[in-house]
Amino acid sequence: MSRASLGDRPVPPERIVHLGLGAFHRAHQAWYTAHATDAADWGIVAFTGRSPQLADRLAAQQGVYTLVERGTGGDRHEAIGSIVRAEPGSDVGAFVTAVAHPRTAILTLTVTEAAYRFAPGGGLDLSDPAVSADIDLFRNLSRVRTEHRLAYPTTVLGRTLLGLRARHRAAAPPLAIVPCDNLAANGDVVRRALETFAAQVSPALRDWLPTGVRVVSTSVDRITPRVTVQETGRVKEATGWRDEVPVVTEPFADWVLAGDFPAGRPAWDSAGARFVAEIGPWETRKLWLLNGAHSLLAATGPLRGHTTVAQAFADPSCRAAVEALWDEASRHLPDLALDDYRTALAERFANPRIEHHLAQIAEDSLTKLRLRIVPVARRERRAGRPATACAVAVGAWIAAGGGSLGELDPQLAADHDFRTAVHQARKTLPGGSRVDAG
Ligand code: CS2
């Protein structure tokens, strides 16, 4: 397919740069941008994390792709045209140029939680070898450049900072950075991490950040499984378009944002996004209820022979564990229509036409559990309750070879009762009678 699939719509100007081009970006931010009333004014230049494959395929289709909204009753197909240029993330030079361009108003990120390289207790992990290698590179940048060596930072924040450095030098107007990964207070933590990074490499850059950059906090939601090769054939059959890189997602979508956009933004609200003063309640509700349940299912489901969320959720034992986790988490959430939210989540998880593989959710599970389960477990324990459902999630994760409790959270590991609860939980899991202390 190509731009012709969009009729005679003009190509929007490049005003958004995205890092982390994948299925989720295309089902979420690119979809919202395409649906905004001022879509004609906002084009996205999207960079993959590293791999050139998706960028090449999308570029061959002039950035246009099919979004398949897979409801319980059928599919809806739509050609999305908001991505006007697709580039491989390995081309850091092109990324830096795009970020520094004065016309660029927004940098969005979907890079996975782990890619920010935060320390277990929060903050940029300066002891991470990739972070320290990037810091060294920045410190030697002028020498590296005069030797005409093409060396670039490898971490997401390193690459972002290199773009910001070029923007600073170009005296370009202030920019909004919009992290769209499932981290609590993602805007604040990314802003602080960039400041920490900049302080290590350039006081001038560090001092410029508060005026040159605003970091917006977001809660993003749309269940988007990894697409299978069969989808190209299905799309061709349904639409007549030959699309090498379609995306399949659920009909539901949600985006909550808090923060400033100094150089403007698309009217994402006209497409259903919500702009709020306080992100906290929205993001914790989503992170603890949706993502927490996902991680619980990803740990327990495979032990009971399931491969997808819908299969695991249909198993009464897994479902009961999810409901128990929701009860524990709900005690620490503000009253944001929690019952309705849980009912809607149950319907979304049960959609049998969305093949959301538990193995996909289980990736980077150490980081995810720290963000989704540990905060609930700690609060439950502080309130004097056993945190049994959290212990089930952790126990199943350990049983599946995910790691150890000490590695996950030293505070919970030092809590004798929680340790016992994890051990008990492991004994009740399939094959659990064989396991020993965790
Ligand atoms: C999932 C999320 O893979 C995972 O960790 O929990 O990608 C989840 O599907 C999205 O956050 C839904 O909005």
Image (cartoon, grey):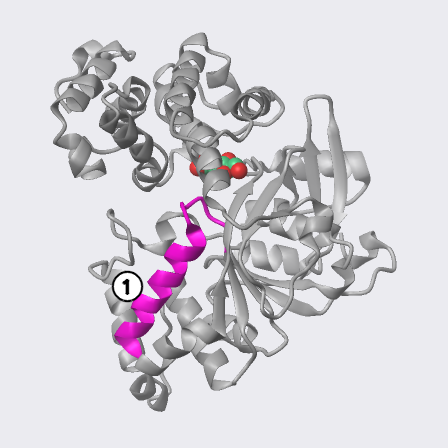
Residue to which mark 1 is pinned? 131
Residue 360 in view in this figure: no
Looking at the image, is 107 positioned above or below residue 430?
below
Q: Choose top left, top right, bottom left or bottom right for residue 399.
A: top left
Residue closest to the far right: 8
- Asked whether 181 falls inside the magenta stretch, the response is yes
Nearest to the observer: residue 420 or residue 310: 420
Q: Is residue 162 left or right of residue 411?
A: right
Front in this rendered view, residue 177 or 136: 177
Majority secondary structure in the magenta region = helix
In front: 175, or 434? Answer: 175
Q: Is residue 380 above or below residue 196?
A: above
Q: Residue 198 location, x and y as percent?
A: 33, 73
- Residue 73 is drawn in which quadrant? top right
Instruction: Provide residue 185's location: percent of width, then percent of height.
Output: 42, 49
Give the x, y percent position of residue 140: 27, 82
| Residue stretch rendered in magenta on the structure | 179-202
Q: Is residue 44 left or right of residue 90?
A: right
- Name the residue nearer the viewer: 204 or 235: 204
For image coordinates 26% across by 10% down, the residue present is 428
Q: Is mark 1 within 8 Å of ligand 1?
A: no
Mark 1 crowd level (few <14, some 14–19, many ≥20, 10 Å Cα): many
